[in-house]
Amino acid sequence: MISWHYARSGIWPCDEQEKNCLELLRRAYPELNLQKINVITQYDGNIGLESKNFRLDVWAQDNKGRIYDIEMQTTNKHDLEERMQYYAAGLNNFTLKSGPPYTKLKSTYVVFFCTYDPFDQGESMYEFNFFDRKTKTIEFNVGMHIKVFNSKGKNRDLNQKMLDFLDYMNGVINHAQGYIADLQKDINHYVNSGKWVDDMDKLAYEMNQVAMKAAEKATKKKAIEDAITLIQALKQVDLSSEVIFEKVLQDYSNDLSSDEIKKLVEENY
């Protein structure tokens, strides 16, 4: 049966990922009449040196330029709303290059599949739009579309194909043939081929690199703060900037370069 651990790490095998993702998006957004998409699994988003990076489970774009993010969530970290907002905003950064007007902004679709009910309302699907709070009728059409599917939902007012997928998330295959059965075969092949081991190792390495970079960044930030405190303290006892530079260099040369320390002294002396 499906393992959502594999789903989050790229269960969509390279030969089948576009077919599988296209069918899943068709079930999530039947009104779009999707015909073709291009897929990237485990897409890393970086929207700025000082911004929090985000990793999209599956990133796709259709032939009309609309962008999709498919996310699998198995653990309730109680941050789904903030995560959805950040991912949706991050996607928008990739839809418009410098120069074109904002009217050229492409539509984005963020869809989360959860094995728990994030809002405890019993719905199988939650869909979010922006409306004027007073009139309730004026829609703020920003081209940002967010859906959350809950495999444990009690209200099953959805198309049968999507209900079949939600049942599949709970370990139930309703039909011996068709998309769900084929998807399970693809996953079984992926797991049995051993490729998932390489993918897990690669993912673990990448996550470790991210953690190391975050730790290094935190260490450097703390070193800068402490160095500034030291500079200001030594300044109070009337030491020259040259002497302060040598003292700070002696204490923080492992974390900061000579040029960085020189700049800190110049800015804080």
Image: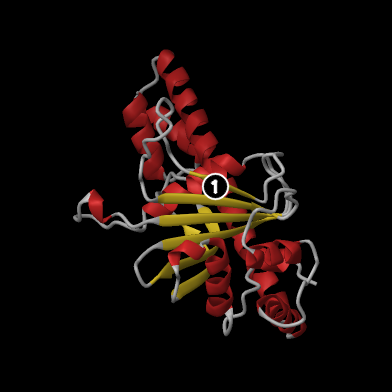
At which x and y percent is residue 207? 62, 59
At which x and y percent is residue 154? 75, 48
At which x and y percent is residue 208? 64, 58
In this orientation, which residue lies closer to the viewer: 7 or 33?
Answer: 33
Residue under the point 65% across and 53% down: 157
The residue beneath circle 1 is 127
At which x and y percent is residue 111? 55, 56
Left or right, 184 with reference to 33: right
Q: Would residue 42 be seen by someone viewing this image from the given angle? A: no
108 w.r.t. 131: above or below: below
Residue under the point 75% across and 80% down: 188
Left or right, 136 with reference to 206: left
Q: Quadrant of the N terminus?
A: bottom right
In this orientation, which residue lies closer to the viewer: 268 or 238?
Answer: 268
Q: Amino acid at mark 1?
A: Glu
42 w.r.t. 254: above or below: below
235 w.r.t. 266: above or below: above
Quarter holding residue 235: top left
Residue under the point 72% across and 43% down: 122
Label 1, secondary structure: give it.
strand
How many C-alpha atoms fall within 10 Å of the one at disc 1: few (<14), some, or many (≥20)? few
Residue under the point 43% across and 20% down: 232
Left or right, 87 with reference to 155: left
Left or right, 104 with reference to 197: left
In this orientation, which residue lies closer to the viewer: 236 or 173?
Answer: 173
Q: Quadrant of the C terminus?
A: top left
